[in-house]
Image (cartoon, grey):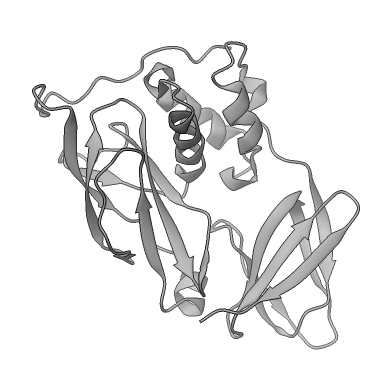
Amino acid sequence: MRFWLLALAIPAGCSWYSASVEVRARLPEAPEHWRQAFPELSFELVSPDAELPQSAALLGGLGSVRLPKRVNWPVLAYPWARSVRLSPAGALYPLDLAADGESLELSWEHGPAAEVLQALVREDFDVSLVNGERLLAEMHARSGGDPYCLDLTLLAARLPSGEFRVTDIRPLPAREVSLEVPPGTWFLGSPFRLTQELDARQALVLSSVPIGRHRLFAVELPGGFDLFVSEREVFLLPFDGD
């Protein structure tokens, strides 16, 4: 199945006499447990070759960005909490423009696709060749509800290869993980993962954790852990956080 169809045109309201366009990047709401755990949460806007705010955007706010006037141009908002960067929300211009034609709606669901297209832009691939709408739909359908669990490295490698197939959109291998941690309300860094309450003398059992690196937090405790998961081993390393 091929994705080399130009799916979108630049909205008619944009001037054709400029190579860039200014939009307001509207940030998504954070999950409730993030708001409890990260009162200092902020976002860093990132987009290739764009003019971006100098300071981190506040939760729920707007950031004005000037983008290249290119189809499927990625815009990302990386959350910062406890001095670490989490998985981003994202949008594709102009696909994710709001009805007013001036606000770009970033979402958690589109963050992984924006990361993939950002990687391709940095490799000088013309992302306007991708059917962005179809790509987003297939990533959603094949992610099991959490697109951060997809193998984004494989997707970024296959998408520009000329041999890309929809079956290249697939989850990373995953496994159950059992951890010895203090009591608390624990959660992984993906905005789609729910919290788990842990009592004393219990192990924290996390299901379907993809192979790779993750952030692990407790709502009530400072700092957090880097969680490294392989097919055979699990490593948990603490980090300090503000």
22 versus 39 height, above or below: above
124 versus 24 height, above or below: above
Which quarter of the figure is the N terminus placed in? top right
Residue 19 drawn at (x, y percent)? 17, 27
Q: Is residue 74 left or right of residue 149?
A: left
Q: Quadrant of residue 91?
A: top left
Residue 128 can be seen, yes or no: yes
Tell me what residue is drawn at x 66 percent, y 37 percent: 151
Q: How many marks?
A: 0
132 versus 77 height, above or below: above
Residue 146 drawn at (x, y percent)? 59, 47
Residue 147 drawn at (x, y percent)? 57, 43
Tell me what residue is drawn at x 87 percent, y 48 percent: 231
**Residue 142 versus residue 222: which sits nearer the camera?**
222
Residue 41 drawn at (x, y percent)? 41, 71
Tell me what residue is drawn at x 45 percent, y 22 percent: 125
Residue at far right of view: 232
Tell me what residue is drawn at x 23 percent, y 58 percent: 62
**Residue 139 versus residue 73: which sits nearer the camera?**
73
**Residue 212 versus residue 12: which sits nearer the camera?**
212
Residue 31 can be seen, yes or no: no
Q: Quadrant of residue 16?
A: top left
